[in-house]
Amino acid sequence: MLLHAPASLDELLLLFAPCFTKPTFQTFRALVLGQVSQTRLRCVTGMLTGARLSAVCHHARARRFFSDARGCVDELSLTVAELIAERLRAPGQSLTVPIDDTLLRRRGSRTFATGWHHDATANSRRGTVAWGNNWVMAGINVELPFLERTVCLLVAFRLRRPRRREIPKHKSDPERPSKRRLARQILRLPRACRPA
């Protein structure tokens, strides 16, 4: 699965190689190249089409990358955060890490980790609760020279799983932490993954 890419993009992608095994990194590289070059379908099969691998590589390989890949998502998050801090942050700019939760609306009762969640983007009282996945995410605020505003670039995330029914509401569920606990896990990533 050898794909040609601009040297500058290849140099950037090579920084992520230590986060994966060699075969998994090749899949990661192909998916990134497909995502960058794809203009229509923003999905796994669209990435393979964008990389011109849909006839060569079965889509199950790409899907397995997201579900079973050997690699550390937290290491990947830290690498992205370091790149943003080193290359995009203006000299002397303080490091601001906002954390928020986001609802991704989903359909179907068999979709993993779905439940009823508050939808902060809803416009009416009727639509303030929606079925879907709830993600706790952290980013880094940067001021880019070609924009007149600050942007937040996503660096880390955790999926919030709904609490189990058998756990009383006044007790915490150790297997399914709250949004606050997930946010704390994200903030502790540098110490957890890279001890001094």
Image: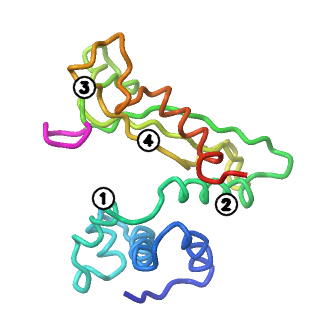
- Sequence-first tag of 4 and 3: 4
Q: Label 3, label 2: how many angstroms apart (C-alpha)? A: 38 Å
Which residue range is magenta in the image?
106-113
The local secondary structure at tag 1 comes to helix
Instruction: Provide the residue designation for mark 1.
Output: 67
Compared across the picture, whether 34 is left or right of 10 comes to left
For label 2, the crowd category at 10 Å Cα-Cα, with few meaning under 14, some 14 to 19 and many 20 or more, is: some
Instruction: Provide the residue designation for mark 3.
Output: 164
Foreground tag (3 vs 2): 3
For label 1, the crowd category at 10 Å Cα-Cα, with few meaning under 14, some 14 to 19 and many 20 or more, is: few
- The way the protein has been coloured in the rendering is rainbow
Q: Identify the residue at image location x=33%, y=60%.
A: 66
- Residue 8 to residue 160: above or below: below
Q: Label 4, label 3: how many angstroms apart (C-alpha)? A: 18 Å
Three-letter residue code for mark 1: Ser
Instruction: Provide the residue designation for mark 4.
Output: 158
Residue closest to the eye, 110 or 35: 110
The local secondary structure at tag 2 comes to helix
Q: Point out residue 154 in the picture as x, y percentages from the top left corner.
A: 54, 48
Foreground tag (2 vs 1): 1
Q: Label 2, label 4: how many angstroms apart (C-alpha)? A: 20 Å
The numbered mark at residue 83 is 2
Q: Identify the residue at image location x=28%, y=13%.
A: 168
- Sequence-first tag of 2 and 1: 1
The local secondary structure at tag 4 comes to strand
Foreground tag (4 vs 3): 3
Residue closest to the eye, 166 or 16: 166
Q: Are marks 2 and 4 in contact (CB under 8 Å)?
A: no
Q: Identify the residue at image location x=61%, y=71%.
A: 15
Three-letter residue code for mark 3: Arg
